[in-house]
Image (tube, rainbow, N blue to C red):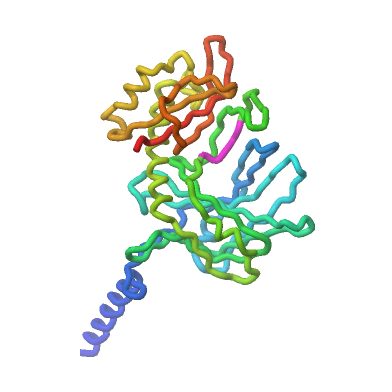
């Protein structure tokens, strides 16, 4: 009899624990932990990205509330150079949306006072969603100075080598760049920047609106179509180096109407312009792009020219 009571109590406790873990105030919760968390050093000069490198993998430090936290510190720079230590929180987007890639939250910190160095410490991070609400990023953090945050998306979040130019800074000669492959999502986290960081641990939340997530879905379609274009136009299978002689509007039209591709059912607005403002792929419409991608064009003489591709999922 006594064994039967113990057995009943154990089963009841087990079921109650499972149900409670999925309920808060009667609302079911979905919770997603980072699949990776990386500290990345980014180096820029005159507004041009020169290099990115992974300094530490800190996934274990932000995936549990155990006070084994990670910390990033501001790097003070001369006027023409920017070197920044950033914390990247990487989440599987398929757990939120019907896309195969990853959501990436990038954090860094700064201090306006030149004699002080900002720090941002983070102990825990998770994406969660209560019933009938938006997804939110919840972080346990402390520090000094101000923190900044941006949202990115990537199908392949890893370091990649490409050749680029930077006409914004008057750099038209191609140079090699190692960068973390991700593209920005239009997101507004301005409230996060307003106040100074608390010196004691506190929980901060960033809201992922439906518009932000809709933008992620469109970015994913653009990245899939970019991969199709690259397969068709690349010079000897080099990533983002296109053979200019292969590009023509008939092929683009066929690719855009391909019902067997991963972007079937979607049409794209396309524009490709060189650094010296020559239009290689014209568009009959003016449009704000969902995706802007730098690439190189190679002509019959083997000369490389910088260009920028604009893609937008047609409404």
Report the front residue among 153 and 185: 185
**Residue at 53% across, 30% down:** 294
**Residue at 50% across, 41% down:** 182
Query: In the image as oriented, which residue stretches furthest toward the top?
Result: 301
Query: In the image as oriented, which residue stretches furthest toward the right?
Result: 115
Question: Which quadrant of the rendered structure holds the N terminus?
Answer: bottom left
Asked if the magenta segment contains residue 179, the reply would be yes
**Residue at 61% across, 53% down:** 108
Q: Is residue 181 left or right of residue 52?
A: left
Give the residues drawn in magenta, as a range.
Answer: 177-181
Question: In the rendered image of this protein, does residue 194 appear above or below residue 19?
Answer: above
Q: Picture coordinates of residue 57 (x, y %)?
A: 56, 51
Q: Is residue 216 left or right of residue 76?
A: left
Report the front residue among 284 and 58: 284
Q: Picture coordinates of residue 300 (x, y %)?
A: 52, 10
Q: Picture coordinates of residue 248 (x, y %)?
A: 41, 16
Q: Is residue 119 left or right of residue 19?
A: right
**Residue at 26% across, 78% down:** 11
Question: In the rendered image of this protein, does residue 216 appear above or below residue 205?
Answer: above
Asked if the magenta segment contains residue 210, the reply would be no
Question: Which quadrant of the rendered structure holds the C terminus?
Answer: top left
**Magenta: predominant secondary structure element?**
strand
Query: In the image as oriented, which residue stretches furthest toward the bottom?
Result: 2
Q: Toward which corner of the image does residue 302 lie, by quadrant?
A: top right
Q: How many numbered marks have been drawn onto this rendered protein structure?
A: 0
Question: In the rendered image of this protein, does residue 191 appear above or below residue 18?
Answer: above
Report the front residue among 257 and 297: 257
Q: Toward which corner of the image does residue 201 lie, by quadrant?
A: bottom right
């Amino acid at each position: 009899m006594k064994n039967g009571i113990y057995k009943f109590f154990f089963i009841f406790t087990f079921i109650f624990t499972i149900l409670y873990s999925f309920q808060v105030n009667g609302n079911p919760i979905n919770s997603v932990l980072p699949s990776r968390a990386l500290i990345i050093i980014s180096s820029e000069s005159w507004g041009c990205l020169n290099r990115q490198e992974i300094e530490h993998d800190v996934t274990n430090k932000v995936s549990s509330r155990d006070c084994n936290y990670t910390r990033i510190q501001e790097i003070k720079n001369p006027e023409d150079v920017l070197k920044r230590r950033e914390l990247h929180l990487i989440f599987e987007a398929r757990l939120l949306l019907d896309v195969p890639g990853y959501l990436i939250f990038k954090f860094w910190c700064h201090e306006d006072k030149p004699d002080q160095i900002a720090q941002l410490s983070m102990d825990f991070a998770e994406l969660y969603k209560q019933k009938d609400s938006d997804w939110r990023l919840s972080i346990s953090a402390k520090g000094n100075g101000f923190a900044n945050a941006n949202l990115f998306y990537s199908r392949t979040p890893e370091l990649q080598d490409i050749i680029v130019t930077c006409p914004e800074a008057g750099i038209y000669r191609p140079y090699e760049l190692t960068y973390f492959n991700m593209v920005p999502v239009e997101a507004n986290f301005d409230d996060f920047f307003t106040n100074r960081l608390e010196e004691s641990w506190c929980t901060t939340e960033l809201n992922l609106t439906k518009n932000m997530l809709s933008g992620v879905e469109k970015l994913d379609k653009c990245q899939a179509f970019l991969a199709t274009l690259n397969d068709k136009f690349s010079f000897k299978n080099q990533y983002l180096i296109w053979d200019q002689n292969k590009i023509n509007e008939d092929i683009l039209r066929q690719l855009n109407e391909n019902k067997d591709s991963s972007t079937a059912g979607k049409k794209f607005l396309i524009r490709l312009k060189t650094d010296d403002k020559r239009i290689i792929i014209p568009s009959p419409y003016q449009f704000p792009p969902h995706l802007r991608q730098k690439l190189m064009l190679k002509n019959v003489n083997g000369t490389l020219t910088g260009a920028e591709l604009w893609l937008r999922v047609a409404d």
